[in-house]
Image (cartoon, rainbow, N blue to C red):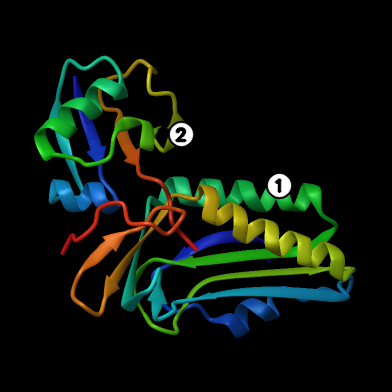
């Protein structure tokens, strides 16, 4: 299964890129984040983040489909 | 005009204010969020804002819809900057017109508080000592000392 990951804020800095295409057998966004955290050394634990799938807030346990775009959202700080 | 948007260029506050006018409005409340030169005791020289635009726009539009349902308002506009901002620049602008001032004040406050709480926008403070850091909503750094 191919997925597109997008990174923002501290995750973008730590990954050194704004996104990546991955090939994975991960079943959920939780698994995808654990793999990405191992690759990039993300400081933020999953419970500090929200996840968006295909442009909408989603449940971490939502089943993923080929081609999904996954965004891990650090705590926001706009304004 | 009513709505939420992101802007990569300087916000034109005068033009936005004129878009709030309506014959039914007797009150207008505007909030300007400016880039200030300090935070948490540190001297700041610049801010970068990043947004996840599709979701920021959807969440911002949702906030505007909520405001129109909860308060007796005429027009509600919010524009948030992205990119690099210097000290003194306008980072976020909220304007509300309403028949009466109570609704205008309450709705304006609601918009800025909800934008800060839930719209996927992130602020990176660049300090005068050369360090920078992405902030949590409580203005504490996500990771200290990132360059």
Q: Name the residue carrying label 1.
A: B66
Can you name the residue that lies furthest to the front here? B41
Q: Name the residue carrying label 2.
A: A57
Mark 2, Cα crowd under 10 Å, few <14 / some 14-19 / many 20+, is some
Mark 1, Cα crowd under 10 Å, few <14 / some 14-19 / many 20+, is some
Residue A61: quadrant of the picture? top left
Q: Which mark is residue A59?
A: none
Label pair 1/2, CB-CB below 8 angstroms: no
Q: Position of residue B79 (x, y in %)?
A: 54, 66
Residue B100: quadrant of the picture? bottom right
Q: Position of residue A63 (x, y in %)?
A: 35, 15
Q: Where is residue A14 in the image (x, y as percent from the top left)?
A: 16, 48
Left or right of residue B107, residue A52 in this image? left
Q: How far apart are the alpha carbons under marks 1 and 2?
A: 18 Å
Vertical position of residue A30 compared to residue A73: above or below? above
Q: Which of B88 and B77 is in front in this view?
A: B88
Left or right of residue A2, residue B48 in this image? right
| SS at circle 2 | strand
Residue B6 in view of the camera: yes
Q: Which residue is drawn at 19% across and 40% down?
A: A42
Q: Position of residue B124 (x, y in %)?
A: 32, 63
**Subunit ID for the residue under disc 2:** A
């Amino acid at each position: 299964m191919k997925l597109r990951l997008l990174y923002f804020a501290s995750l973008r800095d730590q990954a050194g890129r704004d996104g990546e295409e991955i090939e994975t057998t991960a079943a959920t966004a939780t698994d995808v984040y654990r793999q990405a955290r191992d690759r990039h050394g993300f400081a933020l634990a999953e419970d500090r983040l929200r996840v968006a799938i295909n442009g909408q807030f989603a449940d971490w346990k939502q089943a993923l489909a080929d081609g999904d775009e996954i965004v891990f959202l650090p705590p926001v700080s706009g304004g | 005009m009513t709505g939420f948007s992101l802007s990569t260029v300087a916000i034109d506050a005068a033009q936005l204010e004129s878009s709030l006018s309506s014959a039914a409005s007797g009150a207008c409340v505007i909030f300007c969020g400016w880039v200030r030169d300090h935070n948490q005791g540190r001297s700041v020289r610049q801010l970068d804002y990043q947004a996840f635009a599709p979701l920021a726009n959807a969440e911002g539009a949702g906030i505007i819809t909520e405001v129109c349902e909860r308060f007796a308002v005429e027009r509600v506009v919010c524009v948030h900057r992205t990119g690099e901002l210097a000290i003194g620049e306008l980072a976020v602008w909220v304007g509300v017109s309403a028949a009466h001032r109570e609704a205008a004040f309450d709705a304006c406050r609601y918009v800025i508080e909800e934008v800060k709480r839930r719209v996927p926008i992130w602020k990176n403070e660049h300090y005068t000592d050369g360090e920078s850091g992405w902030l949590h909503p409580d203005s504490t750094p996500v990771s200290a000392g990132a360059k």
